[in-house]
Image: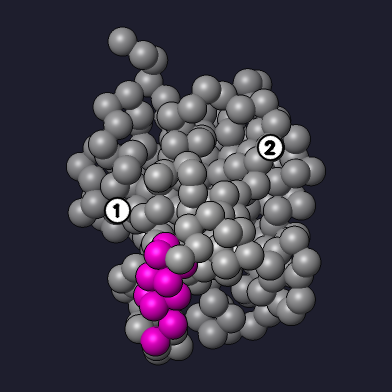
């Protein structure tokens, strides 16, 4: 029997995070751990997940990662919106400072855990607060020296707990027709898939397959566009 692999999920209540928990639940060799602010949030998704109450504002809490909180793989899908955060500073505190603190804490461990990060298409050439924050978070992961997988999805598809009118309209009017045309007429043409919307479940599957199922990765890898849609899962 393979040894148990401890996989820590941050952002488990979000669109991708929930899908991560569902996929980890299916893997008997995995012990899923969710860092949460309040108990009882993730248990509805999996009776196997261990919820760990974690104060993301406390620097001392991060020292527990890899020690009191076992961690072979960390999957970070944390994120907010400027509207929810209330200010640019508060937004960056979630989308940048949390991944950065997690990576810095894990970089002190031996062996070094694998770090999976959900970023965004456009982070390679950032413009504006959102993409610059994502780019800065990616740099923090690279600077940590940890083996990593960074995924850069475009518009995420799935049922959110939080209603976002703009995303709902984009999904109905653009995303689904776009995907239908791309799959039918240009299934392997990179320019079409660069900004193609993607199901949150597919992003989660890519993260779990590369970070959890495959042999340990020594360096780093970035997946976006066609590389995220195909051929990893198809």
Query: Which residue was labeled with disc 1?
Result: 42
Residue at 52%, 68% in the rendered image: 196
Circle 2 residues within 10 Å: few <14, some 14–19, many ≥20 = some
> From where the camera sits, is residue 159 visible?
yes
Question: Which element is circle 2 on?
Answer: strand
Residue at 37%, 75% in the rendered image: 176
> From where the camera sits, is residue 8 visible?
no
Q: Residue furthest top?
A: 1
Query: Which residue was labeled with disc 2?
Result: 220
Instruction: Specify the principal SS of the magenta part.
Output: helix
- Quadrant location of residue 111? top right
Judged left or right of residue 74, residue 48 is left
Cα–Cα span, label 2 and label 1: 29 Å
Q: How is the image coloured?
A: one colour
Question: Which element is circle 1 on?
Answer: loop
How far across and how far down the image is residue 64, in percent?
55, 36
User: Viewer-proximal residue, 133 or 219?
Assistant: 219
- Quadrant location of residue 157? bottom left
- Is 196 inside the magenta-drawn segment? no
Which residues are the magenta region? Answer: 173-184
- Quadrant location of residue 216? top right
Which quarter of the rendering shows the C terminus? top left
Residue at 56%, 44% in the rendered image: 116
Up the image or down, 38 lies above or below 192; here it is above
User: Viewer-proximal residue, 172 or 55?
Assistant: 172
Circle 1 residues within 10 Å: few <14, some 14–19, many ≥20 = many
Which quarter of the rendering shows the N terminus? top left
- Is 174 inside the magenta-drawn segment? yes
| Labels 2 and 1: the sequence-earlier one | 1
């Amino acid at each position: 029997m393979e040894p148990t692999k401890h996989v820590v999920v941050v952002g488990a209540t979000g669109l991708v995070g929930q899908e991560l928990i569902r996929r980890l639940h299916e893997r008997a060799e995995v012990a899923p751990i969710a860092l949460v602010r309040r108990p009882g949030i993730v248990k509805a998704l999996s009776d196997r997940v261990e919820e760990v109450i974690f104060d993301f504002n406390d620097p001392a809490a991060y020292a527990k990662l890899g020690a009191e909180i076992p961690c072979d793989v960390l999957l970070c899908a944390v994120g907010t919106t400027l509207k929810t955060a209330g200010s640019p500073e508060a937004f960056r505190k979630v989308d940048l400072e949390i991944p950065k603190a997690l990576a810095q804490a894990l970089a002190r461990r031996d062996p070094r855990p694998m770090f999976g990060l959900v970023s965004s298409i456009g982070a390679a050439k950032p413009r504006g607060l959102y993409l610059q924050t994502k780019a800065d978070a990616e740099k923090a992961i690279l600077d940590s020296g940890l083996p990593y997988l960074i995924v850069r999805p475009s518009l995420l598809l799935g049922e959110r707990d939080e209603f976002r009118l703009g995303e709902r309209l984009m999904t109905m009017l653009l995303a689904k027709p776009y995907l239908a045309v791309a799959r039918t007429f240009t299934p392997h043409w990179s320019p079409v898939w660069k900004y193609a919307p993607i199901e949150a479940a597919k992003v989660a599957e890519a993260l779990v397959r590369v970070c959890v199922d495959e042999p340990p990765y020594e360096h780093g890898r970035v997946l976006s566009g066609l590389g995220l849609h195909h051929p990893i899962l198809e």
